[in-house]
Image (spheres, rainbow, N blue to C red):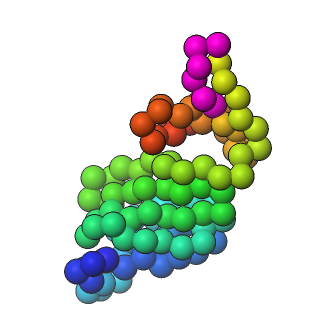
């Protein structure tokens, strides 16, 4: 992290966020086919995957998909909503940079 109080250890199936002082795990962020991680502040980071990017904040315990790539399918509803299918999960784009999963 920018102030070196946290570290991110990247695994194929996600990222382990740990305290730098004692290596205690704060949070494991599950993410398919993880390629890397990039801190955007002391407790927030982007988890970069082969097909999607996750934005997470370990202090607030929040996470959301901010980028989808290599979609399996994409379509529009009659109302103009954008949907994407990725690995069996449908995502809806809100028009303001956020994707939310739909089951």
Give the quadrant of residue 18.
bottom left
Where does the magenta region start and end?
78-83
Q: Is residue 65 magenta?
A: no
Q: Nearer the viewer, residue 88 or 69?
A: 69
Residue 63 position, x and y percent, is 41, 50
Q: Nearer the viewer, residue 37 or 80?
A: 80
Tell me which residue sits at (76%, 38%) in the image.
73
The main secondary structure of the magenta stretch is loop
Residue 78 position, x and y percent, is 64, 13
Residue 25 can be seen in this image: no
- How many numbered tags mark residues here? 0
Q: Nearer the viewer, residue 102 or 73?
A: 73
Give the quadrant of residue 26.
bottom left
Q: On screen, 95 above or below 29?
A: above
Q: Quadrant of the C terminus?
A: top right
Instruction: Indicate left or right for 40 with 68 as reference.
Output: left
Residue 32 position, x and y percent, is 63, 60
């Amino acid at each position: 992290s920018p102030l070196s109080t946290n570290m991110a250890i990247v695994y194929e199936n996600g990222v382990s966020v740990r305290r730098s002082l004692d290596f205690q795990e704060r949070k494991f962020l599950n993410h398919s086919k993880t390629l890397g991680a990039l801190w955007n502040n002391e407790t927030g980071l982007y988890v970069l995957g082969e097909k999607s990017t996750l934005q997470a904040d370990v202090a607030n315990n929040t996470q959301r998909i901010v980028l989808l790539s290599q979609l399996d399918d994409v379509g529009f509803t009659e109302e103009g909503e954008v949907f994407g299918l990725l690995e069996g999960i449908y995502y809806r784009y809100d028009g303001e940079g956020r994707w939310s999963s739909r089951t």
